[in-house]
Image (spheres, coloured by chain):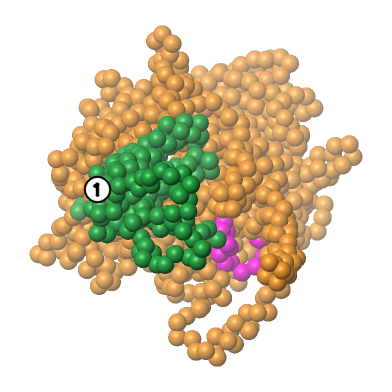
Chain colours: A orange, B green
Amino acid sequence: MFLFLFALLLCCSPLSLAIHESDVGVIDWHKRLVGVPLAPPIVLHEEKNGIPHSVVIVPTASNVLAALNVADGSVAWRYVFETTDGLASIRVDGNAVVALSGPGAATLRAFEATTGLVLLEKRLDAPSRTPTGVDVAFEPSTDTKFVLNTHSITRVGDTQWIWKAEEERNGPYSKLVHTTRALYAVGHAPSSAALHLAAIDPGTGATLEIAWKHIPPPVPTFVVAADIVGWVDPTTQTLAFLQLLPTLKAHIRTEKTLNWTAVVDVDLQKAGLVVGVLANGDAKVLKALEGGVLKAVHTFSANDGPQSLFAGGMDKESKPYIARLWTTVSNMIAVEFYSPDRNMSKITFALDAHKHGTVTQLAIDGTHLVITTSTGAVQFWDQDQLMWGREEGLAAIDVAAFVELPLPARAARADEGESFTARLRRQISDAKDFPAYAVAFAQRFATGMEIVTAADDEPLVRDAFGFRQVVVVATAYGSAFGLDTASGVVLWTRVFGLGWAGAGVGGTVKPLKIFTLNGEGDKKDVVILAQRKASNTLVDTVLFRIDPLTGASITPVEEDMDRLLEGKDVINGPLTEAFLIPDSDVIILVDEFFQINLYPDTDESTALVARLAPTLYLPFTESFSDGPRVVGHGLKLDPNLSDKYVAYRTWGLSVPHGETVARIVRPRVGPIASIGKVLGNRTTLYKYLNPRMFVVLTQGTQAAEPGCGVYVVDGAKGSVLYSAVVPTGGIEACDVHATMVENWLVYHYYDGEGVGDGETKGWKIVTVELYEGELDEKTRSSDMSAFSADNMQVKALEQSYVYGNAISAITTTSTKFGITTKDIIVATQNNKIHAIPRRMLNPRRPKNRKPTAEEQQEEQLIPYDSVIPDDPRRTLSHNYEVSNTRNIITAPALLESTSLVLAYGLDLFLTRVTPSSTFDVLSENFNKAQLVLTVFGLALGIVIAKPMVSRKRLRERWYQ
Amino acid sequence: MSKNLEYSTLQSSSKWRNLPLPPGFSRSTSSKGAGKAVTVPSPESYNALKEKRALDFAIAPAKSLPMQAFMLYMSGSGVQIFSIGIVFMLLLTPFKNLAGMNEAFAQFAPSTAANPKALLTLVMQKLVYVVCNALTLAVGLWKCRSMGLLPLGTGDWLAFETRGLAPELTLL
């Protein structure tokens, strides 16, 4: 009967390779992000077929040019520039967005503002030096563009010309002004205190006039309104301005009656409006009038806040608006609007500084506001109503960790010392949940699906399979987020406080490391180690210990979460490295003097370290004059010098001359289900499971024989257990990605040297498995001392394959008990997340022969093939575009078969993978109804047949 | 339901020998008409006959071996219900046979034996019987091995190997 059931099970669970269409959006989610704006966004209005369509154009720090729909904040389009094609500048004119990018800002692209279609892509002459100023001017009502790049101007359009200035005497230029009479290039060199001007014929590119004006004290910046160049002399606090004439003969005029501190460009050059700021806090809107005069048309009176942001913009009717934004003493955001034709209006609204930080950029569209905050959030406000917000800080995640949720309160509180009556009462009260449970059970039974709910009102508790967890991420913008893995919803947002640097000093907090520790009960705590760089150049290491469910700080205990997250200063200086001692909740922090600081700094942790110190080794990279090196350290305590343990050098990894250490790849730790690999003929290859080994990637592009090194190193004595040198691929920096788990190392590189017979250029992926020796040979590597003679006995099996894609991140899946096969997850350069099955990367795949029957049956070996096929069914990311992935992290679910995968970079993508298929749950199409009907049918048969049989027996007894 | 045929009543050693005959039954009636001398087999020849029968019985398992080997060959090396059934039979019957050996050989015990169920009666035949059963068992084990059911390789014992903690700890 059992065999029959088993056979039935096997028949009903076909190996599913790809994700099902119905699973998309159920088991995975994808957040399409654009990055934190670099410059104030620009709002554009477009009418298409009578339907108005407004977008916000943002150039971002993630090297993306994107347009967000004003209606809902969704991404209308985005253009992700290549890493080598850095976005330098954008300009918007009418329906076109023009971007300059690449080395020397020499690539010009024009995009249609609402659709993102590339209208024009052109490579211009790259300047010989790094450009200091780029600008684009547009000829009205034609497609002609003038591109300024430091010393040259290129006309792009029907007629083309290039104008070049003599570099020594003229320029650099940074601003281009197009008027009906001439095209002017304006620039200033702060060092030489000169304003350079050039007037050019826009039609022919002929030089009309070149001149430079001496402006005695160097000025930091200048602005252009209509055809007037204006600047503020910081020493005399005077406003100076100059009209641009084709002859360049105009004189500099000054305005000395008021104490000016700055002029601010509000992107209203055509309307001729700029803002001048006065020393008393007033701000004047200055308008360029005919005849080359700047006139104050409006005054924003001094406000109660520290600093103001100004922004200008056109509304749908092309009416100019200027806004001033400041933070009031009562921590409200106040905005005043000015428009030449309308009455001034003022709004105030509250922005949660403890959630979003402070406003760093402002853009306006009429009286609507688009603000960027210091945590990277982009928000659209209509009056004092928040219409939408985007957490673009998530495009700059530095560290991330999965955290398991605690058990439901009901299951967790079944404590021992409960009296009988109390238990009875509890169980009766729990019985009220039974109908809901029954309904859920029936539903689960009928649909065969475990529904991971993500409703807002649901408490954050562990689900049956552990699919619902919290991802805690910390971003480069000094904020931390809690994300629900079931839906991708942001559960909480915290902004890191600056500690002592908060009051008046200022600074930045950059997350370095994240650890998960055991907290109270069965809860987990997240520890984020961050580096706080105060504005006065003091660096501290701060530790934030937070509750992953709410984001509340645990130490120091915090009652009120409506404040900045304050941590604990653990080191008064930079952190060199931090380690978590396994099977404990103690973190070792190594400071710049290699002193060991413990967290938590308790007697228990001191005792633990004292006990472990003689056999504890800490390998990490240290900077030397010839570059970083990997150095191993032991711990010692010298009571005469310090009461802290000190890490002293015990070994250094020697790499060939000219090679420098690029990166350390730490092995992925997890339970090891098997210490050997059983072959088809029942013999065993014992895995080399040295728990101290890690991978070092080196860079030898400057070496005599260029190559990128891959080393597997023993952490206790620095001996190299495996090494390989792969080609550099003809590029500056080595682009090797590696991951290691148990005894399995996989690395990926670009091989540009395959010129031999039958070799190809391309990306290669190499799989290496380390064993203790030949068949059935064992050295007990996992519990052997590093100083044992057998420690160096390693046999590496390796094979290399051609892989079709460049990758940007690589990792392995991880499961609860480590029994499930581990697949490799890679983020490819073509914006996909791929899984490469373990079977493909088995280094025992037989070459030039067929696998034997035993190998086929028992090991499932397939013949070696030099190419790993690009199987679209193995694409985890469906048709989502997961761009610029920097890292992938995986975490086990409660189901052994399943692993959670989170890819972060520009986008966020989370899915579940089952490398050995879901062997521990019934497949969805398992015919439960049939099974139940069969069981019921048999039971019914018994019920009917039993009296009949007993009657018959009785009769037999009588009449025999 | 089965009734044991008590052949031993015919034997001189039967304990029923001294009972009076049933009424109307005469020992001599059957042989009277023939007029021949009743040739009662001597106990010695009877014992020899029994010994021969015992030897036949002892090598019976070996005789069925070719048949069983053919069945094994036909059942294939896959782990299926049919082959498993046959293998189980092959593995179990030798032990069952050996457990019941003394009982089985008791009927062939010579009349001189003090205790027909003693291990040492018919010891030679019993040894042959053991060897033949061992042959059957060997065939069964060979089949197990070819099906991959015998834990002979190191891989079969891998799960029982344990490893401790390494003496040095490297934090990574």
Residues rendered magenta in the picture: A453-471
Q: Could you say which is closer to the camera, residue A253 or residue B154? A: B154
Instruction: Name the side, left or right, on which B130 lies relative to A356.
Output: left
Q: Residues within 10 Å of mark 1 (few under 14, many from 20)?
A: few
State the quadrant of the N terminus of chain B: bottom right
Locate residue A13: give its quadrant.
top right
Residue A457 forms part of the magenta stretch: yes
Q: In this rendered view, identify the residue nearer to me: A957 or A891.
A: A957
Q: Which residue is mark 1?
A: B123
Q: Is residue A234 visible?
A: no
Quarter where residue A694 is shown: top left
Most frequent secondary structure within the magenta stretch: loop
Q: Residue at x 44, y 54 (%)?
A: B28
Q: Residue at x 14, y 61 (%)?
A: A637
In the image, residue A116 lies at what x, y percent? 71, 33
Q: Position of residue A543 (x, y in %)?
A: 39, 62
Apparent side of residue A334 relative to residue A393 in the rendered image (left or right): right
Residue farthest toward the top in the current orientation of the protein: A757
Which x, y percent locates residue B103?
A: 35, 55
**Residue B80 vertical placement versus A258 (above, below):** above
Badge 1 amino acid: Val
* Quadrant of residue A454 within the rendered picture: bottom right
